[in-house]
């Protein structure tokens, strides 16, 4: 059995912590580890290998978080554009069959990177039930035993029961209104649709080809045009862009006669909104869930998250407050689904807060935009030991680098110099330059940019060890 982790979501309802370039699956919002790392821990011991499917722009974050967690991924499959779950899983199935060439088709345990499952033992037990069904050629989904009449989830109605506690799927139901959801809860024959699956790779592809041959053909063509770049599997972008956008539920699960649901009661949440973190969090005597440096008075039933400074609340009830270093969200807890409207507005205005934090992660380290004005920008840059920024130049800005700690190996035009603490160098407009950390501790420096245009797209790369420079 192989684990396939889908990590392509945008997490817009968890703004401002979740951003386009660093969405919720890469954040530590439900524990000390990131949600991706928690998912990796959850499947430890269950399968022989793990692959992650993610967006091209998130590839280095996935690789770094897996490496930091001590997990060696079988592959990181890069989607050039999002096409929903049915095509993404098809790519993973093609990859699993190829890497398992000559042997029987592997089982695929398909999971999202941004779910919470509190009872891992119960989850493993459910997987073992599902494994038996998948080995018999069934297409298995996991149905969450509902704890409330939730209107934010789709539902699965169960049919006949098998000997091992699995059920045939009678039907899938769209997100219901409250009255309908309550009737499902009272009936007892319905489960929340978790979006987790277990099936043989060849069985899934056969069902996809039978019901959506257009998706199958586009994914097969995209996969055949693949190339491997170190840890990353890049598929043919043009072929994949031509693929229809559809979920596995619509493409396969609602059509196949092989669908089986295995009940799961394990403290599951898809963390679809800030209210979900309140629901699964440790509530104090006033019903509050707090994270970070928080002081509350006469506050109840609220979720308060402070990421960078003290947040104080007075006289609040059923409110969500989330503080980051460049934005603050205050929302009624029962309206947090509409945070996506704020995200849409930010996109329409072309604001950077929709896509990135003040801290921006790169494969070589991270930078923090400390200050900026009309013709200047100040960044604090951290370069990991042994890492190197691309050999590059800028048309519109000059840069001044001041080392705070560590050692910098600097290429400045035709010079190569070593800088240590309190030393600096100036790089004029148009001069080819590079920055490297040859040491064993992180390199910290302050970068002062000045010029008529300071955008990140004013970078002409000549060489790059992370594959971001154009081909010669």
Image (cartoon, rainbow, N blue to C red):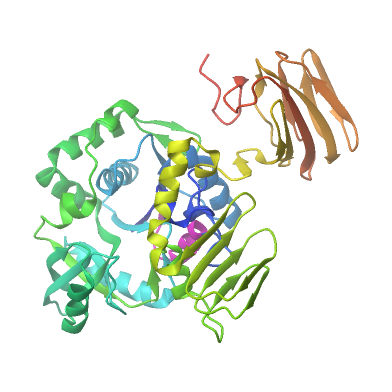
- Percent from the top left, x then y, of residue 397? 70, 20
The magenta span reads 35-51
Q: Quadrant of the N terminus?
A: bottom left
Q: Residue furthest bottom?
A: 285
**At 10% from the left edge and 55% from the top edge, which residue is drawn?**
255
Q: Which residue occupies the foreground of this view, 386 or 328?
A: 328
* Residue 269 rendering spot, x and y as whole percentages: 39, 68
Which of 312/369 is in front?
312
* Residue at the (15%, 47%) spot, across then down: 206
Above or below, comparing residue 356 to residue 188 in the picture: above
Please tell me whether residue 331 is drawn above or below residue 53 in the rendered image.
Answer: below
The residue sitting at 69% across, 28% down in the picture is 374
Residue 402 position, x and y percent, is: 84, 33
Residue 272 visible to the viewer: no
Q: Is residue 471 visible?
A: yes
Quadrant hosting residue 119: bottom left
In the displayed structure, does residue 394 sit left or right of residue 89? right
**Which residue is situated farthest in the front direction here?**
315
- Residue at the (80%, 30%) spot, across then down: 401
Nearer to me, 152 or 386: 152
Nearest the viewer among 178 and 83 is 178
**Left or right: where 405 falls relative to 49:** right
> Above or below — where is 326 with respect to 386?
below
Q: Is residue 48 magenta?
A: yes
Q: Residue furthest right?
A: 422
- The answer to whether 225 is drawn above or below residue 289 in the figure is above
Q: Position of residue 408 (x, y in %)?
A: 81, 33
């Amino acid at each position: 059995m192989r684990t396939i982790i889908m990590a392509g979501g945008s997490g817009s309802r968890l703004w401002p912590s979740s951003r386009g370039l660093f969405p919720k699956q890469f954040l530590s919002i439900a524990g000390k580890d990131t949600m991706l790392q928690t998912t990796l821990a959850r499947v430890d011991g269950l399968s022989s290998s793990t692959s992650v499917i993610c967006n091209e722009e998130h590839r280095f974050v996935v690789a770094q978080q897996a490496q930091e967690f001590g997990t060696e991924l079988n592959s990181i499959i890069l989607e050039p554009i999002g096409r929903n779950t049915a095509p993404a899983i098809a790519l993973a199935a093609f990859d699993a069959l190829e890497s398992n060439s000559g042997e029987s088709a592997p089982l695929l345990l398909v999971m999202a990177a941004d779910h919470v499952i509190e009872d891992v033992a119960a989850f493993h037990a459910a997987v073992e039930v599902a494994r038996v069904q998948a080995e018999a050629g069934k297409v298995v989904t996991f149905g969450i035993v509902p704890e409330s009449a939730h209107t934010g989830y789709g539902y699965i109605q169960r049919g006949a029961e098998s000997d091992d506690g699995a059920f045939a799927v009678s039907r899938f139901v769209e997100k219901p209104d409250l009255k309908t959801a309550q009737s499902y809860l009272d009936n007892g024959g319905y489960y929340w649709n978790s979006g987790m699956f277990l099936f043989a790779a060849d069985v899934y592809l056969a069902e996809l080809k039978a019901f959506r041959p257009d998706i199958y053909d586009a994914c097969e063509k995209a996969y055949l045009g693949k190339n491997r770049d170190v840890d990353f599997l890049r598929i043919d972008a043009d072929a994949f862009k031509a693929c229809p956008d559809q979920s596995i539920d619509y493409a396969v699960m609602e059509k196949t006669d092989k669908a089986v649901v295995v009940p799961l009661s394990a403290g599951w949440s898809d963390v679809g909104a800030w209210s979900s973190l309140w629901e699964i969090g440790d509530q104090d005597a006033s019903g509050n869930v707090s994270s970070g440096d928080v002081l509350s008075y006469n506050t109840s039933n609220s979720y308060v998250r402070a990421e960078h400074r003290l947040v104080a609340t007075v006289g609040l009830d059923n409110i969500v407050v989330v503080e980051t270093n460049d934005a603050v969200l205050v929302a009624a807890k029962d309206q947090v689904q509409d945070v996506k409207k704020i995200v849409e507005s930010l996109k329409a205005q072309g604001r950077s807060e929709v896509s990135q934090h003040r801290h921006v992660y790169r494969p070589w380290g991270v930078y923090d935009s400390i200050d900026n004005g009309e013709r200047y920008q100040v960044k604090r840059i951290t370069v990991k030991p042994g890492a190197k920024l691309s050999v590059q130049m800028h048309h519109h800005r000059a840069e001044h680098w001041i080392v705070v700690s560590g050692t910098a190996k600097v290429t400045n035009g035709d010079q190569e110099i070593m800088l240590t603490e309190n030393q600096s160098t100036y790089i004029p407009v148009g001069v080819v330059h590079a920055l490297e950390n040859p040491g064993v501790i992180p390199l910290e420096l302050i970068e002062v940019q000045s010029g008529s245009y300071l955008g990140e797209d004013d970078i002409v790369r000549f060489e790059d060890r992370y594959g971001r420079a154009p081909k010669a």
